[in-house]
Image (cartoon, rainbow, N blue to C red):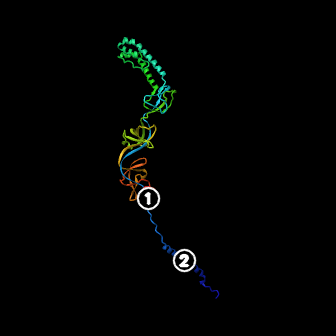
């Protein structure tokens, strides 16, 4: 039956593809079921929970009454010090001691003597003129003022050119006074008195016991009028200027004792508040306080630290400033875990802070713990 075709033969390739796809899906499903069964049958151990415990060092709170101490520092300077200038001109002749920095002089000793031959000669000349004037007046005084003659005659008799000028006799009457003035005696007398006052400036004496700090001239040199000659300080009492916050001004009293020490704390001295400035620095809100101190080992310019006790406060505790966070919080130990507590800072020192609000017996961290947080488990120990 030629020309006859069967439809079933044309569909065989399609059926073959469908069967292959179904077989693939069945294989995938079987593989998934087998894998799930194997995974379910495996035994996976549960993770073991570990609790980390951090060792810490603590300090137990013991509140007490503590003096608040202001710590400050500064350089000391001699309380009595002068710069010596010349008021006259001449050659620097000599000194009672070596005129060098570091030389000590007692009060009244000659620091410097300047040649005064010229002014001395002028004074002698003026004195001679004065005594001649008085001598010429004696005859007239004997005739017109016999009651005054004796005292003026005695003045001439006692007159000595080598001694300081003696005061003129006091006139007994207004007529005698006008007579003396008319003869020019008083004018001559005051000129001599002025020269003698100037003569005293040729010898410069130590105003107090002390030491030369710097010298600007050597013996034999010419001294000019107004020239600086040296610096001179007393080594008996020194003064330290410190700045104190104005909030503590009411707690400071004149005469209050102050403990001072050097940076190494190998030497200490006791000073006292000598002066308090009346002006507050507007930019820093501090006031200058001056402390007097004396003793062995002190030198001009020495840097000292001062501890000034200003007030006693009850129920306070002092801790390291680094332990305070968020301005007013601390970590404490409570039931082996860290907890936070709020405190009231009262006073800050250089490395510590004084706080209120902690109960006696409370255990506070004494060292910073990296990563510390509230609820952290800790164990107390030394490390």
Of residues 274 and 111, the one nearer the viewer is: 111
Residue 282, position as x, y percentages in the image: 42, 42
Pick the quarter of the image with the N terminus.
Answer: bottom right
Residue 83, position as x, y percentages in the image: 46, 32
Residue 53, position as x, y percentages in the image: 43, 60
Decide if residue 173 is on the left or right side of residue 191. left
Residue, disc 2? 27
Q: Is residue 310 visible?
A: yes
Q: Quadrant of residue 73?
A: top left
Decide if residue 80 is on the left or right side of residue 13. left
Vertical side of 51 occupied by 111: above or below: above
Q: Please name the residue shown 36% across and 12% down the image.
A: 144
What is the number of the mark on residue 54?
1
Of residues 227 and 295, the one nearer the viewer is: 295
Vertical side of 341 occupied by 145: above or below: above
Q: Is residue 282 visible?
A: no
Q: Quadrant of residue 147?
A: top left
What is the number of the mark on residue 120?
none
Of residues 163 and 277, the one nearer the viewer is: 163
Q: Which label's residue is closer to the chain start, 2 or 1? A: 2
Q: Please name the residue shown 44% across and 22% down the image.
A: 196
In this view, the residue farthest toward the bottom is: 1
Vertical side of 354 occupied by 225: above or below: above
Q: Secondary structure at mark 2?
A: helix
In this view, the residue farthest toward the right is: 2
């Amino acid at each position: 039956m030629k020309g006859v075709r069967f439809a079933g033969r044309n569909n065989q390739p399609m059926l073959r593809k469908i069967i292959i796809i179904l077989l693939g899906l069945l294989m995938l499903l079987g593989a998934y079921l087998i894998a799930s069964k194997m995974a379910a049958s495996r035994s996976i151990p549960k993770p073991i929970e570990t609790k980390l415990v951090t060792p810490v060092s603590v300090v137990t709170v013991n509140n007490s009454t503590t003096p608040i101490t202001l710590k400050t520092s500064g350089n000391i300077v001699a309380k009595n010090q002068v710069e010596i200038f010349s008021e006259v001109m001449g050659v620097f002749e000599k000194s009672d001691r070596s005129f060098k920095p570091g030389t000590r002089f007692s009060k009244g000793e000659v620091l410097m003597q300047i040649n005064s031959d010229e002014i001395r000669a002028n004074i002698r000349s003026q004195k001679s003129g004065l005594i001649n004037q008085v001598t010429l007046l004696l005859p007239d005084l004997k005739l017109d003022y016999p009651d005054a003659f004796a005292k003026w005659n005695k003045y001439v008799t006692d007159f000595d050119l080598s001694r300081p000028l003696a005061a003129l006799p006091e006139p007994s009457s207004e007529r005698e006074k006008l007579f003396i003035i008319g003869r020019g005696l008083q004018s001559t007398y005051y000129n001599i008195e002025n020269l003698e006052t100037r003569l005293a400036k040729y010898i410069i004496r130590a105003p107090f016991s002390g030491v030369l700090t710097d010298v600007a001239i050597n013996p034999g040199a010419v001294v000019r009028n107004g020239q600086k000659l040296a610096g001179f300080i007393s080594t008996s009492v020194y003064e330290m200027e410190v700045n104190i916050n104005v909030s503590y001004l009411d707690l400071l009293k004149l005469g209050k004792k102050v403990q001072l020490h050097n940076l190494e704390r190998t030497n200490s001295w006791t000073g006292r508040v000598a002066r308090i400035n009346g002006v507050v620095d507007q930019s820093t809100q501090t006031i200058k306080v001056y402390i007097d101190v004396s003793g062995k080992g002190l030198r001009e310019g020495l840097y000292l630290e001062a501890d000034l006790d200003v007030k006693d406060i009850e129920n306070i505790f002092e801790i390291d400033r680094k332990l305070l966070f968020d301005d007013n919080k601390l970590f404490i130990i409570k039931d082996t875990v860290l907890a936070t507590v709020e405190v009231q800072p009262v006073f800050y020192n250089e490395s510590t802070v004084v706080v209120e609000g902690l109960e006696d017996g409370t255990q506070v961290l004494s060292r910073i713990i990296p990563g510390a947080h509230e609820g952290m488990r800790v164990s107390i120990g030394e490390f």
